Image (cartoon, rainbow, N blue to C red):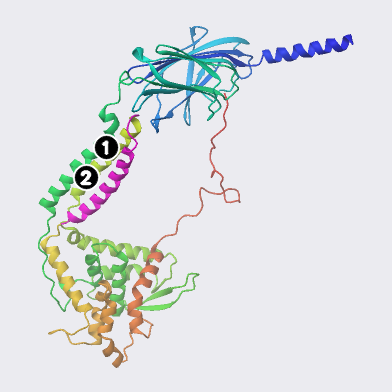
Amino acid sequence: MKLYSQTLVFFFLFCSSFLLGQERILDFDVEVEVKEDRSIEVKEYIKVFSEGRKIKRGITRELLDSRKLENRKIKTKYDIINIQKNGINEKYHTESTGNGFIIYIGQREVFLNPGEYTYLIHYTVPNQIGFYADYDEIYWNAIGTDVDFKIENASCTVTLPNGAKPIQNFAYVGGYGEQGSDYSVEENGSILTYKVNRSLSPYEGLTFAIGFDKGIVKAPDFFSRYGTTIILGLGFLFLLPYFFFTWWKYGKDHPSPTSEIIFDVPDNLSPGAMAYVKNEGRKSDVSFATSVISLAIKGYIKIDKKESNSFFGGEDFSLYRTLKKKENLPVEESNILDFLFETKDYISIDGEYDPRMSNAMSTHHSILKNKYHDIVTQGNNQKYIILPMIISAIILILGIVSYASIPYTYGFNFFFIIAFVILALLGIILYSYLIKKPTIARLNLKSRIEGFGMYLGLIEDFENQPEPSVDHFEEFFPYALALGKESQWANKFKELLEKMNYRPTWNNNPDYFIYGTNFMPHFRNRSVTTSQKPPEPGSGGSGSGGGGFSGGGGGGGGVGGW
């Protein structure tokens, strides 16, 4: 019996010593002083018992860099004034985290002896007061809900500024989101002291909220509330007059000449050149396709069409060179022959990459650009778009910075940012169209092309028009393709061609009508895909046979600890 009693005593003493020696926070006392400039000064007195387990060199304190204030998430900035251990200044360093930073108190090479230590963390935080209709408010987590240790005693003393009296106050005890009321509060004028009536388990905290007299703490000024909208409004005040006055001075168009029907090619343009000018340098595949058809009709190329064997179907083409000697060809057509048939007298246009097609299309576009770029861009006045684009970007950046950095900016300012982006973008798009002022020479050329297109696109007969013939049909057929009039041009000659049992010699399709109206989209698509180099395979190289990834190779991030 005596041995049994001694064993129980020994076991009780062992457990008691273990519990008494457990690392914990003995006292966590916080002092918060509210300043008239909307900042707060915080002193945290944290008395801990260290056993050398988690608390080896000192304690850590995480400070979060954002919070909600007046129903809006804002950045929180901290100015650390002083950190002490047992009343003596202590060395520390900080490390950033994803949502703030951690203060590591102590030195890496200095380890604590087991025992009690009292730390002071002294810092200030600007812009922590909320402003409401009937009161101003300090709402602060005195002890956060991410503390790793048990807290035996917790309290917080709040001093309001300049004798302000509390109108209402609440505190909340417990884990994140809980509204525990295990506390007492003592009011002494403008000083309130909260004491938690029990120990706090790990990850339990203390939060207080005090509403006090308005007019004592300096309220945010007008710019702090509406600064983003003011900045964006100033942007509009610049852009709108700029758009109007520059358009009035540089963008009002010359009177457009009336287009009259003409029966011959204007300005001796080639089919490819006409497509380039008509589309103002865009749709280079249209220009290329019309030049190929022009070469075929002139007898330099034969085009064979067949059903594609690819999964998606469609049509493939083969081009065969039929004449070696070149006579009186436009340079853009001559270069097509040189590049497409550089090594062979045929080329397959089936969607598989062929560098000959790529070189031919790019050179064809470059030649037309060198010859006609100035003509199609004269009077575009694109230089006047640069300034509003730069100003819009600057205003937008300033607006975003203002919204993100000024804590008291009203939330609706964000919608003005969205509105500015939409309106500025639409304004610049519209302005880029209106500021164009084509030269008289450009307008006259456009009018002549439109007049020629009228002849190609209208079925009825006109006085003094050329006599219908197969040669005339074929001569102008590439121009009809260039201007998108191929169906109308084929219909204009349908009766004549059927009467003469016309079958084109420059392609292998017996039906000229179907060939003419369906050729362009299929040929353009196959030409583009045949000219495009396929992308490089793989993500970063190898993977030892498995294809690679999770992270794609290289160094990996992660792992924590102190």
Looking at the picture, which amino acid does disc 2 mark? Pro
Give percent across and percent down for residue 277: 22, 65
Label number found at residue 388: 2
Residue 108 is situated, as x and y percent measured from the top left of the image, at 55, 17
- So how many labels did they put on this image? 2
Amino acid marked by disc 1: Thr
Q: Which residues are magenta?
A: 407-436
Residue 159 as seen in the image, left or right of residue 361: right
**Distance of label 2 from label 1 (alpha carbons):** 18 Å
Disc 2 + disc 1, Cβ < 8 Å: no
Q: Nearer the viewer, residue 123 or 458?
A: 123
Please state the horizontal and vertical placement of residue 412, each as a whole percent of the image: 32, 38
Corner quadrant of residue 454: bottom left
Instruction: Say which residue appears at 23% left-offset and 68% top-offset.
Output: 273
Residue 383 visible to the viewer: yes
Q: Secondary structure at mark 1?
A: helix
Residue that mark 1 sits on: 229
Name which quarter of the figure residue 405 lies in.
top left
User: Depth-wise, is mark 2 or mark 1 nearer the camera?
Assistant: 1
Left or right of 242 on screen, residue 425: right
Report the side of 190 relative to 449 (left or right): right
Label 1: few (<14), some (14–19) or many (≥20) C-alpha neighbours in 10 Å:
many
| Residue nearer the viewer, 295 or 63 | 63
* Circle 2: element type: helix
